[in-house]
Each structure stands twice: as C-alpha cells, then as structure tokens.
Image (tube, coloured by chain):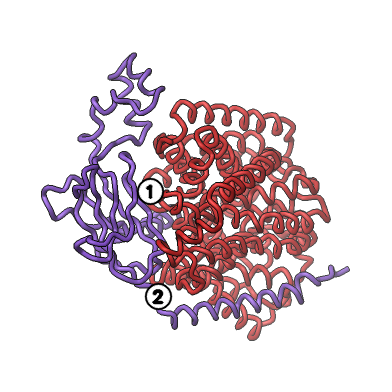
Chain colours: A purple, B red
Amino acid sequence: MVSVFLFLLMMSSGAISSECGERQCALDLQLKEGKDEAITSGHFNLVWPIEKQSTTSESQESEGDREDESSVAKNSKKNTSNIKGALIDYEQHPAKQLKISSEQSLTTISHSIDIHSTQRAISLTGFSDGIYYAQLFDNNDQPVSNQVKVTVEHHSMTKVWIIFTSGAVLFLILIGYMVTKVFRHKEEA
Amino acid sequence: MDYNPISITTALVLLVLFGVVWIFFGWWLGRKNKSLDDFMLAGRNVGLAFAGATAMATWITSNTTLVAPQLTYQYGIWGMVGYSLAALGLIFFAPMAKRIKELMPKGYTCGDFIRVRYGKAAWVAFLVVSFCYAMGWLVSLGMAGGVLLSTLSGLSYHVGMTVILAICVGYTLLGGLKAVIATDYVQTIIIIVGILIIGFVCYQTVGLETVYEYNKQYHPKLLDLLFPASLLFLFNNIFFGLGEIFHSNVWWSRALAFRSGIGKKAYLMSGLLWLPIPIVTGFIALAAPSLGLYPESSDMVGPMVAANLLGDIGAIFVFIVVFSALASSLDSLLAATSDLVTRDIYNGLVDKKASKEKLHRISKLVILGLGFVTWLICLPRLSTLGGVLLLTAGFVASTIWPITLGLYQKRLSGEFATGAFVLGSVAGLIGYYTVGDYVAALFSCIVSFVICMIGLLVKNDNFDWQRLKNMEKPQ
C-alpha cells in the first residue's frame, strides 16, 4: 500500500527538464513543470539547481551571514562545516534578478524580480495566456542563465463550464439531501 | 531583513522548547489512561469547549496556514473562497456526528461502520482509500514542518521535518487522544490569535488597494473571476473538504469520544468559526507579489509574507503559530490512523481475539510505525503540500455519498458502495493526471454519486440499524 502511494506521489511531482544550452551560463534555469509543458493554470515554477561542492566553500562560510554561525566557526571550522552542510540550505549563486518578458529579446520587461543569493527556485503565478521568456541576471545586469520559454495556455471555457456546471449540480443535490434528510432527521425510537 | 528571518540557534531553541513542553503535557495527561477507551477515545466523555476546540484546531492545520495561502497564490480569489468553503465539511458533518454516536455507541472507528453497514469488500476498499488519504495528509504535515523551518530559518528541510514528526509521535504516544484534544485546545487559542494579528498587520501595512492594483497589473488572473483553473478548483475543493471529513477517522473518533449531545454543537460551532480563517490567510498570499515576495515553492508563501511583515521577532511568532497548527493536526491524524490500523487491520484481519490490553500496546507500536513510514516518504520531498493533498482528494471524494446514504438510507447495498469507492477513486486519479490536480475530487464524487444512485434504484438492502448498535465482529 505504501509503495503504491509512493508511486502515485512520484508521478504527481512532475519531471525536471533539460540542461543549459549555452556554455557560459553559470546557472541552468529550468521550467519545473517540464520543458515543453503548456501551463494551464497560469502558475509555474522555475528552478536553477546548483552543485553543492562548488558553492559551499570555506570562504563563503567565513563571510558568515549570521552571527551565531560565525561564532561557532571561529571555534572549530572543520567540524562545523560538516554540521552546517547537513543542517542548513546555504549555497550561494551570482543571480540577483529574474526578468520575464513576452519578447525573446527581453527588450520590454514585464516582471523584474529580485532574487536572493541562496534562492534556488521561484514560484510564479497569475499569468494570462501567452508566451513568456525568463532569464536570470547578476548585479551588473549580465545574464547568468539560459533563457527559458514558458507557454501559458489556460483551459478552454467550454471545458471549464461543463465541469463547473457538473460540480454545481452535484453540490446542489447534496445540499438538498442534507437539508431535507440529514438536518431534519429524527432519531427512531 | 534577511532572507531567513530566524537564526538557526533560535529555531533550534524553539524546537527543543516546544518539544519538551508538548511531550511533557502528553505524558502528564496520559498518566491516568487505564483502558483502550481512555487511550483511543478519551473515555468517551469530552465536553463542548474541548470538543469545539479540537475540531477546529484539527481543521486549522497546515491546510489552513500553509496550503490555503498556497492555493490562493495559485488560483487567486476563487482559491481563497473555495478553500474557506471547506468549512462546509464540518457544518454538514455536525448532524452526522450525532447520528454516528446514536447508531454505534460501542464503535471505535469509521471502519467499524463500513464493515457492519456494507460488508467486507466495501470495508477493504474503504480502508485502502482511508489509508491513502491518511498517509497523504501525514506526509503533507511532515513536509510542512520541513518547509516552515526551511523558510523561516534556513534550517535544512530534513531536520525540520524529522523534528516535528518526532515531537508529535512522542506526545501522541504518551497521552493518546486525551493529550491530542488537550493540546488542540491550547493550540487553537494560539492559532486564532496569531492569524488575526498577522491578517490585521497585513491589512494595515499593505492595504487592499495596493494588493488589488499590483495584482491587476502583474498577475491579472489572480483577480479574474473567470480564471479557468480556479473555476475548476472551486467545487473540487468543496468536495475534497466534505470527503476528508465524512470519511476520516479523525472526525469519527471525535464524534464517538464526545459526550452525548455534544458532537452536533461542537462541529457546527467549529465550522462557522473556521469559515473566515482561510480568507485571512489567503489575503496574506495575495499580498505577496506587491511586497516583492515570490517564494521558492508556493507552499512557503504564507509564512514568508507573515515573517516579512512582522520582522525578525514576528517571525518567531509566525513559527509558533504555524508549528501549533501543524502539531494539532499531526497528532490527531497519528492517533486516528493508529486507531484505524489497530482496530480494523490488526484486530479485524490479523488477530481477531486480541485483548484490549494487547490492542492498547499495538496501537502505540502503530503510532511509532506510522511516524517512521511518514518520515521515510517525506525524505525526498517529491511534491508541494498542495500537490500531495490534492492527490488524495481523488480518493476521499468517492466516500461522500456512500457514507451519507449509509447513515440515513437502508437501501444502499455493499456491492454498490464498493463500486462507488473503487470507481470513484479511479475517476479521481484519471482526472488528476489528465486534466489537473484541481478536478480529482470532482470527478471522483460525480462517478461515486452515479453508482450510488444506480444502487438505490436497482437493489434494496433493507439494512437493520440494530446491527450497528450491537457492533458485530468481523467474520
């Protein structure tokens, strides 16, 4: 039963898409829902996974974003780096902004979103039908990732109204049954 | 403000503090548990205040504090309204709670009802549905613990998930349902006060107009009343909420544990009080884009916005509120699923002559086992919280009609109830994978309804209610 449940869960998680096409890209930006997947809900996720080995360096750790971490590091760097690796999601990357445009050349930017140096994914929502292009940029406004194309194509309203009406009818039947039978039920002697 | 507003040390101190307090509370409450009835059903004597609080606290879970903002963030206005209508589950279950207590005063689980009312085939199908749902909810709660700590402190997802599971398993193991209900009471007060403060601060800081104008320009679908996916989601979520409550032993065990005459009032009260809460948590999510906050994963949006609005100290407050919400559901689910596994699977299928003392020991082992299996499934973090929950929607919505009709109609027979469970679940899964996660419950409920109606037309089971009062043993 547990294995069946695990299988269903894996199926629901979606596939991770392709690699970066350009060599100079520091980050590999991907559409989590799948490379050529049309987004039917206006909501999608972009991810830029980075390898742990290249980023959790000693130098980054000594900079210490947090007071408590730096004080611990002073005492025993080697031991704490192992503990940190296990406890903290801490890897850093050069991306500072995510830009989204409906043009491939990114000349008119519709969304410009600040990215934190440890952030590795972003969840975006509320997009209308259309094709969008997304890319990560660093502090100097230089691209640090490949460009990702996202196609948003909402369900047709015909399909939506058929399903919506079915739900509404079923709901009304249930309400009717509840009011006439369940709430008015008198216990038999 | 830092990306993660709570330091690792503070997060660890809070975890240890919470763990010690709740586990001690569980031990203190559980030390007088003498019998299986005490452990599983709190002596069948829970009064109105505790009954209302436990129903409400259990329903205010990661679903309300994490998934309601997530679904509002994804589906906009209808996501928020649709989520709050899940309160109908509690309101509609209110008269059923009274009926359940009257029909089976000696019963322990919802499985007992299905077995006696519909027979063994329906019972097995129901157990599969119920177990898939319970595991889905347990996994989503374990994941939520990891997500919460990772968002607020940067602490690894795996550490947060492991610790919250360990704490909840600890105090449920020591105190049984009595500890669960008592901690729920305290947690309800923390959660309601916390959510109201966060909602008020969000309204004061950001304001309705800013949220509206920003989303209208940059995320127009969130405000669109004809947003296709959200229209599909609306009734889906209502049926999901109904299915969750109608079938789950979390709610049946409470109906049986409450003192006579208390269940109906407690569920009505908790449903009406719960209704506005997802509106508040949903509004917080709608404010995220206007604050420049875009979460890594949509299920992080609630705590992320709240922590941003309340500052570093406020983030600790957010942590306490969400942690309480998670714990209140996780403990309830562990206790109720353990009852179901112990009574229905172990006592019903493995050892039919087991004594009550032995069942008491087994139920504790089951709680441990459930905690471990949940931890294992949570490890790879395969999906978002909403994704996991909506997967289970396809299963639970298939139970709405067989349970409602089973409680009030003598006609519906076991064969058709079994068909409704199985074919409804299959239809739900087909909808989930072919259309989207937002139609699984709807498809499941429609198919289940059609089968039940055919069943009522073609066969009259003429069930004798007395069989439930006597609580027949499995053959």
The answer to which image quadrant residue A150 occupies is: bottom left
Q: Residue sitting at 64 percent across and 28 percent down?
A: B24
Chain holding disc 1: B
| Quadrant placement of the C terminus of chain A | bottom right
Horizontal and vertical percent position of residue A91: 29, 36
Q: Which residue is mark 2?
A: A155
Disc 1 to disc 2, C-alpha distance: 25 Å
Identify whether A63 is placed above or below B221.
above
Horizontal and vertical percent position of residue B42: 73, 43
Residue at the far right in the pictured view: A189
Chain holding disc 2: A
Q: Tell whether A86 sits left or right of B352.
A: left
Residue at the far bottom in the pictured view: B458
Same-chain status of marks 1 and 2: no
Q: Amino acid at mark 2?
A: His
Horizontal and vertical percent position of residue B255: 73, 54
Q: Amino acid at mark 1?
A: Glu
Q: Tell whether B271 sits left or right of B234.
A: right
Q: Which residue is mark 1?
A: B296
Identify whether B105 is placed above or below B232.
above
Q: Residue sitting at 44 percent across and 83 percent down?
A: A158
The answer to which image quadrant residue B416 occupies is: bottom right
| Quadrant placement of the N terminus of chain A | bottom left
Question: In the image shown, does B84 or B38 lie closer to the viewer?
Answer: B84
